[in-house]
Image (cartoon, helix red, strand yellow):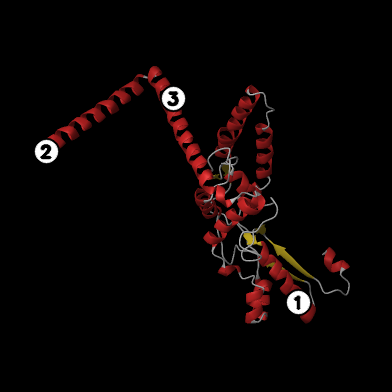
């Protein structure tokens, strides 16, 4: 309304993008130059800091490549100057109603890309748990975020260094909490004017100033996105990928060993306190012993 009131005799158009992400095609796939929006979340996840987030998995992740926004701006400038619409037109440049991708699909593809091109020196093994339940979200924040940060800060104190991880983690969780309202809902935007403008362009202009997100391959785009964050934001050398994969494998093994040890300790404490747990344990051991004995006897008979 302010734009309409103050524009006077100027020809005005309004362009409204959704969540602006890395480039799709130009200047090259995956280019990014800041940590805003999804870029910061990808870094936090790839480095192992952010492992769970309160989000509705099936909600639409309305991400739009930045080069499609720029192409639309150029096309809108031409159309507004040449055709001079009588009213101020609003152009929504979104992907949700033309080529939707949900948060679950995006998260799975991001994690799959981390397996192929991991970030260097991650804090923990990358993971992404989506939950829409507040209690579960608080549990994951305590177990997967704050507890490891406190443990790491204790290690820093013991080695004579300044603790910093808890402060960093609290700042990260506050930032993510500001996004929760939006990533737990799907939004519908009218792209009527955007589609109208697309039809006004010549085939050659549609190719040069492409903002048709229906042609976007999400799996390919997300992989290029993660690669772009690694290359252009983190400034990591692609030659270091084999070493990063080795570190990722070590972190995975540590994760499995830690969980196994935690389970055995919990089970041992449970056996010491519960007769029912002891009975279950003896039944499992006895069953496994009989099964192995039967298998050995069967193998001997066959020979």
Q: Say if residue 115 shows up in the picture.
A: yes
* Comes first in the chain, label 2 or label 1: 1
Dividing the image into 4 quarters, which one contains the N terminus? bottom right
Point out residue 184 in the picture as x, y percentages from the top left corner: 60, 50
Q: Which of the 4 image quarters holds residue 5? A: bottom right
Q: Earlier in the sequence, mark 2 or mark 3?
A: 3
Q: Position of residue 97 (x, y in %)?
A: 59, 65
Rendered view: 52 above or below 64: above
Relative side of 180 to 102, left or right: right
How far, Cα to Cα, is label 2 from label 1?
A: 84 Å
Image-quadrant location for residue 63: bottom right
Instruction: Answer with mark 1 or mark 3, whichever residue precedes in sequence.
Output: 1
Q: Which residue is mark 3?
A: 266
Residue where numbered disc 1 is placed: 78
Residue 303's disc is 2
Residue 278 image label:
none
Say what secondary structure mark 1 lies in.
Answer: helix
Q: Badge 1, how many Cα within 10 Å: few under 14, some, many 20+?
A: few
């Amino acid at each position: 309304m302010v734009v309409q009131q103050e524009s006077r005799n100027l020809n005005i158009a309004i362009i409204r993008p959704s969540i602006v992400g890395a480039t799709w095609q130009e200047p090259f796939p995956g280019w990014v130059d800041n940590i805003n929006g999804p870029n910061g979340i990808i870094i936090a996840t790839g480095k192992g800091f952010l492992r769970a987030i309160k989000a509705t998995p099936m909600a639409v992740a309305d991400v739009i490549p930045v080069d499609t926004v720029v192409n639309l701006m150029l096309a809108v400038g031409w159309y507004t100057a040449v055709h001079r619409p009588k009213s101020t037109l609003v152009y929504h440049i979104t992907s949700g109603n033309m080529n939707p991708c949900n948060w679950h699909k995006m998260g799975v593809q991001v994690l799959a890309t981390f397996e192929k091109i991991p970030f260097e020196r991650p804090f923990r093994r990358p993971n992404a748990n989506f939950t829409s339940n507040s209690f579960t979200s608080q549990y994951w924040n305590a177990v997967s975020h704050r507890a490891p940060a406190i443990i790491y800060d204790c290690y820093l104190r013991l080695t004579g260094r300044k603790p910093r991880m808890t402060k960093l983690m609290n700042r990260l969780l506050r930032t993510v909490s500001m996004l929760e309202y939006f990533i737990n809902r799907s939004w519908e935007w009218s792209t009527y004017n955007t589609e109208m403008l697309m039809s006004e362009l010549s085939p050659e202009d549609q190719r040069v100033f492409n903002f048709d997100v229906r042609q976007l391959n999400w799996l390919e785009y997300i992989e290029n996105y993660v690669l772009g964050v690694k290359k252009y934001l983190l400034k990591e050398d692609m030659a270091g990928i084999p070493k990063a994969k080795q570190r990722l494998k070590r972190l995975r093994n540590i994760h499995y060993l830690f969980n196994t040890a935690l389970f055995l300790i919990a089970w041992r404490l449970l056996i010491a306190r519960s007769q029912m747990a002891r009975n279950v344990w003896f039944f499992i051991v006895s069953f496994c012993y009989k099964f192995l004995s039967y298998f050995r006897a069967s193998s001997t008979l066959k020979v």
